[in-house]
Amino acid sequence: MAIPSSRHLASIGAHRPTRRGRENIVVTFLTSRRASRWELLVVAALVVVAGVISVRTSYFFADDFLFGTFFVETPLTPALLIRSYFGHLVPASALFMSVFYNSVGLNWPIAATLMVLLLLAGSVAMTRLLDALLGSRRVCALAGASFGLSLAVLTLVAWWGAALGNLVPLVACIAFLGSVTRWHATGRARHLVSALLLYALAVLFYEKSLLWSVYAVAWTILVLDAGQPFRERVKRALGRWPLWIPVGVVSAAVSIAYLIGDYRAESGVTPGLGRLVGFVLRGVFLGLIPSVFGLDLQEPVWSRFVLPLAVFANIAVFSFIAWTIARAPRTKAVWLFVWLVTLLGQIPLAIGRAGLFGLDGGRLMRYQIEGIVFLIVGTAISLVRVREMRTALSLRSRGAGSVRTLVIIAVATVLGGAAWGTSAVNFVHANPGTAARSWVNDFRARWPTDRTVTMVDGPLPANFAFDFTYPYSMASRALPRLVDNVAFSTSVEGAWAMGPDGIPGLFAFDASQEWPVGRCTDGGEAITVLVDDASTTPRQLLVTYQAEGTGDVQIVAGRRGALGDTSGLSPAFTAAPGGGAFVLTVRSGTAIDTVRVASAAPGFCIDSVSVGVATGHG
C-alpha cells in the first residue's frame, strides 16, 4: 500500500473529524500544545533540584587542582590559550578558567551555582530547540527535563572540569541547532547571527564541537526538509550559504590549528580498525542505550547483569523506533539522522581514547551526552509525527490497546525510575568529588588556625588528585589553595606531613628499606649511595646527616648513568649545625638505584638513607 503524501494527509485531516481512541491518550497528552507555562516551571524546578543534589556533596578534584594552581601560577598569554590540555584545543575554556581561578580560586559554592545554572540552561536550550521545530508542546518541555535529569548529564554536574570541558560546549551546540532551526523557519538575521556566535563559542570551548557543523547539515537535510525530494533538500541546503560559509571558515581555522599543534601527541595511540569499531559498538550499545534507562553499566551494582540489562535496553529502544516508523514512516529520516550523528560522534572519541581507556572506555557516562541529546530529540519528533499521522488518517483505536499502552508505560516508568535512582545514588557515593569533600572537611577540622604550619611536601591522596599531573598533585601546590597558613620545608625538624590517607599531623616516617652509610665529605667529592628500590609508587627518600656548620646540600635520586653532573644536583637544602634529616619526594613511575649527595657544609656526614612514606602520625 502506497504511503499517502503529506498534502494528501493534510487534506484528509481537514475534511474528516478526528476520532481519538483511548490508545492515543498518552501520545495525545504528550504532544498537545502547552496551555500555560506551569509545565516549564515544573521542569525548571526538577532540573534545579537534581543539580543541587548532584553538587551538594561534591567538590573540586582531579584536574581541578591541576588547573586551579596552573592558571594562578601561569600568566595569561596567547600561548597559554592554545596549548594542549590533555590533547584538546580549548582556548575559550582556558581563558574562562584563568579568569575564574584568579578571581575566586577554589570556591565551590560559586562553581556549584554556575554548574546548576548551566544544567538549567541546557534544559532550556533543548526545550527551545524542539519548540522551534514542533511548536510549544508538552513533549518539548519533557525533552528538556529528560536532558537535565539524564544520568550522563548529571554526572558532569559534580565535576567542575568536566562541566566546563563538556557541558558548556554541548549547551552552546544545542542552542546553535535551535538558532539554525529558527533561521530556517523565519529567515531572520538575528537567528543567523546567534547561530554563528554560538557555534564559534562551542568550538572555542572544545574542538570536538566541530562535528556539530556536520550535524547541522544533516539536520537541515534529513529533519528540517523532511518530505521533500532529496534533490530539493540538497538545493535548499546549498541555498543556506550565509550560514555554511562562516561556519566553514571557523571550522577550517580551528581544524588547522588542531592539526598543526601537538594535541594528537597527548591523545594516545590511534587504534586499529577493529579496536575502533569495538570501542564504538560498546559505547553505543553498552553505554548510551542503557543510560537512557538510568543504567550505568560500568557501576559495580550492575556488574553481574551487564549483558541481560543491555539486551533488554536495546530491545526496548529499537522496538520503540520500529513502532514509530510503522505508524509514521516519515520518522525514518529522523532516526537515520539520530544514528548517523551518534555513530559519527563516537569515532573521534574512539580515535583519541580507545588507546588510553581500552575498548570499554566509551561506556563512561560523560561520553554519552551527545548521544543522549539526539535520542531525546528523535523521540520527541517521532511522537509528534505519529500523532500527526493518526490525526490525518482519523484512525479509531480499541480500548484494549489503550490499557496495554498504559500498563507498558507504567511498568517502564517504575523500572526506569528504580534503575535511575539506583545508578544516581551509587554515583553520588562513588563520585571522587564526594570523597574529596569529605577529605577537605576532615583536613580543615584537623588543621591548626593559630599559627603557620611548616610541612614537608608529598603527594595528595590518590582520590583527590591524579598522580600523572605531577607536580600539581603535590601538597605544596594544592594546600595553599585550601589554607592560608602553610609553609613548606625539606627539613623534618618540627615539621608536619600528610601521608596517603590524607591525615595531616607531626612528621613520621614509615620506612620500607634503610641503607646505613656513615660517610663524610669535606665539600669536594659527592657521596654516592647505591640503593635497591624498584618501587614505582609515590614515596619519600629520607636522608639523615650530621654537620659541624651550616651549608647548602644537594640531593638527587635516580638510575645510574642518568644522574648528570654532580654540580647540578637539585633540589637544594640547607644543613643545620649538629645534624638532622631531609626529605626528597620521589614521583610515581620513578625507580631509583642511586642517591647522590653533595654539600658545602663543614663536617657533613650522611648517617643513613631510607625509602618509605611520610605520614602525619608522629
Image (spheres, rainbow, N blue to C red):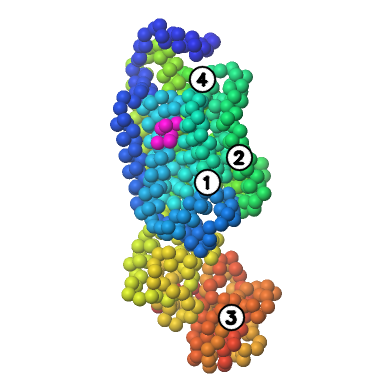
Q: Residue at x 70, y 74 (%)?
A: 561
Kind of residue at disc 4: Arg
Closer to the chain start, of discs 1 and 2, is 1
Determine the residue positioned at 49% across, 35% down. Answer: 194
Q: Position of residue 338 (x, y in %)?
A: 53, 31
Residue placed most toward the observer, 210 or 445: 210
Position above or below: 392 against 456: above
Query: For the magenta stretch, what is the residue range?
Result: 124-129
Q: Which residue is label 1 attached to?
A: 205
Q: What residue does disc 2 label? A: 251
Q: Is residue 418 magenta?
A: no
Mark 1 belongs to which amino acid? Phe
Looking at marks 4 and 1 on the same chain, the residue that comes earlier in the sequence is marked by 1
Q: Quadrant of residue 272?
A: top right
Rendered position, 230 above or below 102: above
Numbered disc in front, either 2 or 4: 2
Q: Which mark is first along the chain, 4 or 2?
A: 2
Task: Look at mark 4 in the image and give the residue it sits on.
Answer: 330
For the residues labelled 1 and 2, the Cα–Cα distance comes to 13 Å
Q: Which badge, 3 or 2, comes first in the chain's sequence?
A: 2
Tell me how far mark 3 sits from mark 2, CA to CA.
51 Å
* Residue 232 as seen in the image, left or right of residue 394: right
Neighbourhood count class around disc 3 (C-alpha, 10 Å): few under 14, some 14–19, many 20 upward: many
Q: For this rendering, which residue is in front, 564 or 287?
A: 564
Give the mark nearest the N terminus, 3 or 1.
1
Q: Please name the residue that numbered disc 3 is placed on.
A: 554
- Across and down, in percent, residue 56 comes to 35, 51
